[in-house]
């Protein structure tokens, strides 16, 4: 059935859900439709679901100042009702970090796990349905006809809107670029995060017992990101490059209940790369690095033990069976190899320098058995030219979330959805 709505939202990630909750709170009579390509919303709500309630975690500082972000975070908290985890015993790490010029941010954080995240999504979607919001899953939007105020989905149906919110997340990065090209929105995408994911025994990174996802900020734009523990797994995500070939980025998640405790931790060490003159696309740069890793890894991500890396030799299958290396990688389907052949020297140097600092702050991180997986790539660096503070890009068309560069995490994505929703209310 085709339909006409006051607001159509593309994507049921936190940005889309945040907008829908705010709109239906403010104007219960609005006809709202959410179109979601997947069976459930994807991204972080479904993957470990750590939610951070402290600025600037997740907030691009060029779009959000502290005061504004904190005002929105209060609204986000009222929708998501998080159970904030306690952080204890971190002073010793903080002091060691300060001596090295490293910051350890203490963040108000909740953690639901991959299983708990799925429960949250189901609860949120059923709350929206009870409010009369239509949520159509497995409904991928393929095109937007802005002149007709119409979106077209993969099965050929069309939906009409008065206002449109496009919030397709990182996965929808390319979709968003196509839309911007089609409707004439200018953008750059010159920033990208490139890094490694480490997997190690919990006893070699015991800080996680006191602080679930410790946020260390190192010199040269390197940071720890997305730490998982207790029932933690490294996973790979498939991306399509512009030439149609596939490449992988690794990632991590953890369960709170359903899986067996494996005593492992994983976290990313990311370096932000800001490409300048001649201005290049971060997306293309990341694709090139992803493809290079595929070439060297025989179509798979590369993994290397720290012990081998230190000796300047590639890892081989035996690196994962010796008695020193007493845990199995949780990500099957990686190639033992040499990360230094695949990663640009400047990025590797700054990440390795930061890892040595981290090993001074939390001795044990660079145990020879620690596994480094490559590549971990974060593509969320579209920077559209917005027409106003509410992320409007064209009459009645708004963007929000990670794909549009207005956020870099669940809570900020939710906040950016609310911010766009405020703009939408002004237009209706
Ligand atoms: C594996 C993983 C783990 C993460 N862990 C965390 C974490 O623990 N904490 C944290 O703060 N952040 C985490 N993140 C980041 C977090 O997921 C994002 O910051 C956040 O989800 C962004 O919200 P969003 O609404 O912009 O996009 P998303 O959550 O990605 O949602 C966008 C939705 O749009 C849908 N979509 C895309 N294109 C279309 C289309 N054409 N038509 C219809 N629907 C479409 C997608 O299927 C998706 O469900 C993680 C990300 C990943 C990938």
Image (cartoon, rainbow, N blue to C red):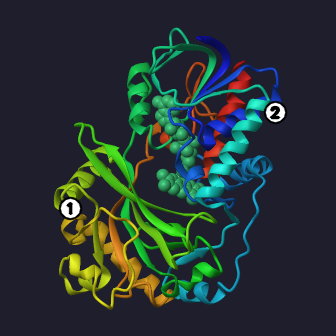
Q: Does the beta carbon at disc 1 come under 8 Å from ligand 1?
A: no
**Residue assigned mark 1:** 297
The spot of residue 90 in percent (x, y) is 65, 84
The spot of residue 159 in percent (x, y) is 57, 14
The spot of residue 257 in percent (x, y) is 63, 65
Q: Quadrant of the N terminus?
A: top right
**Residue assigned mark 2:** 25
Say left or right for 327 vs 227: left
At x 31% / y 82%, what residue is drawn? 306
At x 51% / y 69%, what residue is drawn? 232
Q: Quadrant of residue 250?
A: bottom left
Q: How many marks?
A: 2
Location of residue 370 with respect to 408 vertically, above or below: below
Question: Observer-nearest residue: 47 or 215?
Answer: 47
At x 66% / y 60%, what residue is drawn? 112
Question: Observer-nearest residue: 86 or 327?
Answer: 327
Q: CA distance from mark 1 to mark 2?
A: 50 Å
Residue 280 visible, this orientation:
no
Q: Are marks 1 and 2 in contact (CB under 8 Å)?
A: no
Q: Of the two numbered discs 1 and 2 on the same chain, state the one appearing first in sequence.
A: 2
> Badge 2 local density, few (<14 within 10 Å), some, or many (20+)?
few
């Amino acid at each position: 059935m085709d339909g006409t709505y006051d607001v159509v939202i593309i994507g049921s990630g936190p940005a889309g859900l945040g907008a829908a909750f705010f709109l239906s709170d403010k104007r219960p009579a609005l006809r709202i439709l959410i179109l979601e390509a997947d069976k459930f919303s994807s991204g972080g709500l479904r993957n470990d679901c750590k939610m951070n309630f402290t600025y600037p975690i997740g907030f691009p500082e060029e779009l959000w100042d502290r005061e504004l972000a904190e005002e929105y975070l209060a609204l986000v908290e009222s929708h998501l009702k998080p159970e904030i985890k306690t952080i204890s015993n971190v002073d010793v790490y903080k002091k060691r970090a300060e001596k090295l010029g490293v910051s350890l941010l203490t963040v108000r954080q909740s953690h639901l796990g991959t299983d708990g995240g799925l429960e949250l999504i189901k609860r949120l979607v059923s709350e929206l349905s009870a409010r009369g919001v239509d949520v159509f899953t497995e409904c991928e939007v393929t095109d937007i006809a802005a002149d007709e105020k119409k979106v077209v989905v993969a099965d050929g149906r069309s939906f009409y809107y008065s206002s449109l919110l496009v919030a397709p997340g990182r996965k929808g990065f390319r979709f968003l670029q196509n839309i911007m090209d089609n409707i004439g929105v200018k953008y750059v995408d010159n920033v990208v995060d490139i890094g490694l994911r480490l997997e190690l025994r919990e006893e070699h990174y015991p800080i996680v017992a006191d602080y679930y996802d410790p946020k260390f900020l190192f010199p040269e734009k390197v940071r720890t990101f997305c730490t998982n523990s207790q029932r933690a797994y490294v996973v790979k995500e498939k991306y399509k490059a512009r030439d149609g070939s596939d490449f992988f980025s690794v990632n991590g998640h953890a369960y709170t209940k359903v899986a067996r405790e494996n005593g492992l931790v994983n976290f990313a060490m990311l370096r932000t790369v800001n490409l300048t003159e001649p201005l290049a696309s971060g997306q293309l740069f990341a694709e090139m690095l992803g493809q290079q890793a595929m070439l060297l890894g025989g179509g798979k991500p590369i993994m290397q033990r720290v012990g081998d890396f230190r000796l300047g030799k590639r890892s081989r299958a035996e690196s994962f069976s010796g008695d020193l290396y007493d845990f199995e990688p949780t990500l099957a389907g990686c190639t033992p190899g040499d990360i230094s052949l695949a990663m640009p020297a400047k990025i590797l140097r700054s990440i390795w320098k930061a890892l040595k600092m981290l090993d001074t702050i939390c001795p044990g991180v660079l145990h020879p058995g620690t596994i480094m997986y490559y590549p971990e790539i974060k593509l969320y660096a579209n920077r559209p030219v917005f027409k106003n503070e509410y992320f409007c890009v064209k009459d009645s068309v708004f963007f929000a979330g990670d794909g549009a560069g207005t956020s870099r995490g669940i809570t900020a994505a939710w906040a950016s959805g609310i911010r766009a929703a405020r703009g939408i209310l002004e237009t209706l």
